Image (cartoon, rainbow, N blue to C red):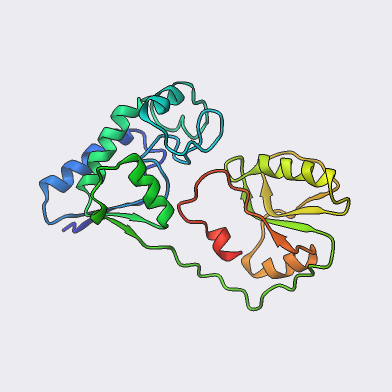
């Protein structure tokens, strides 16, 4: 006997609108069934589930006319995961699904605010905010030398959405200022950048993070993501 449908993330599903309609229908046909929709991304708002527009900038969820014009020229690979659609039907179908849900679970207050911007008629009583818990805790905090030259630490898999172009701009800005300032990416960088000021460590283990911070002389952290995070584990860990 099925008691709950829990939607984690439908990103990359072949027919997302048919799927959303199926969820809505299932909830209506089987009244004891509980439907929970988790907002790990903004897919219910837009096929560009990171809310970056056709120009690669955070859109802020503008009016539908602007969204419609954007969708016609959006060429990002993550948008192409979904079949072609218009934003009006997209919002209508996903809006019905969200209204049918017993709980729309957000993981930050900012996510709830953005969701309500897209769906102002959504019953606020259905929306919960339950932040994730970060299990990783270092055995000791890193020792930072703030008297030393500036070393900016950036942690994670830094794609364009996560701020790879911002890292490029940061390097250019540092080059015009502090001659000793450097940038260290603990993780990966999805952009081929060559600079004497840049070091990319590659993938790392959590238990090595404190040692990597100290070994590279990092004394300030920067989170360069250009998309609105539903919850940022990296920020929480930093």
Looking at this view, is 71 or 19 the one in front? 71
Q: Is residue 146 above or below residue 202?
A: below
Q: Is residue 151 left or right of residue 128?
A: right
Looking at this view, is 238 or 5 the one in front? 238
Q: Quadrant location of the N terminus?
A: bottom left
Image spot of residue 39 (x, y percent): 37, 50
Image spot of residue 76 (x, y percent): 52, 30
Q: Which residue is painted at 35% across and 25% down in the image?
A: 86
Image spot of residue 29 (x, y percent): 11, 46
Taking the view exactly as shown, the residue that stands out farthest to the bottom is 139
Taking the view exactly as shown, the residue that stands out farthest to the right is 179
Q: Is residue 124 left or right of residue 71?
A: left
Q: Is residue 95 visible?
A: yes
Q: How many marks?
A: 0
Q: Which residue is painted at 67% across and 42% down in the image?
A: 166
Q: Is residue 190 visible?
A: no
Image spot of residue 225 (x, y percent): 59, 47
Q: Quadrant location of the C terminus?
A: bottom right
């Amino acid at each position: 006997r099925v008691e709950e449908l829990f939607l984690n993330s439908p990103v990359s599903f072949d027919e997302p609108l048919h799927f959303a309609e199926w969820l809505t229908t299932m909830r209506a046909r089987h009244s004891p069934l509980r439907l929970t929709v988790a907002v790990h991304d903004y897919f219910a708002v837009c096929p560009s589930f990171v809310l970056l527009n056709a120009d690669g900038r955070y859109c802020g969820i503008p009016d539908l006319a602007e969204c419609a014009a954007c969708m016609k020229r959006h060429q990002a690979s993550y948008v192409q995961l979904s079949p072609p659609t218009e934003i009006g039907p997209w919002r209508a179908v996903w809006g019905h699904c969200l209204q049918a849900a017993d709980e729309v679970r957000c993981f930050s207050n900012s996510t709830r605010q953005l969701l309500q911007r897209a769906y102002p008629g959504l019953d606020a009583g259905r929306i919960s905010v339950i932040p994730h818990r970060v299990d990783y805790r270092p055995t000791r905090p890193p020792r930072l030398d703030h008297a030393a030259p500036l070393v900016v630490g950036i942690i994670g898999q830094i794609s364009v959405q996560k701020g790879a172009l911002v890292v490029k701009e940061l390097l250019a800005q540092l080059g015009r200022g502090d001659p000793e300032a450097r940038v260290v990416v603990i993780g990966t960088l999805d952009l081929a950048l060559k600079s004497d000021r840049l070091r990319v460590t590659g993938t790392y283990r959590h238990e090595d993070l404190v040692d990597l911070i100290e070994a590279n002389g990092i004394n300030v952290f920067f989170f360069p993501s250009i998309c609105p995070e539903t919850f940022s584990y990296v920020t929480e860990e930093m």
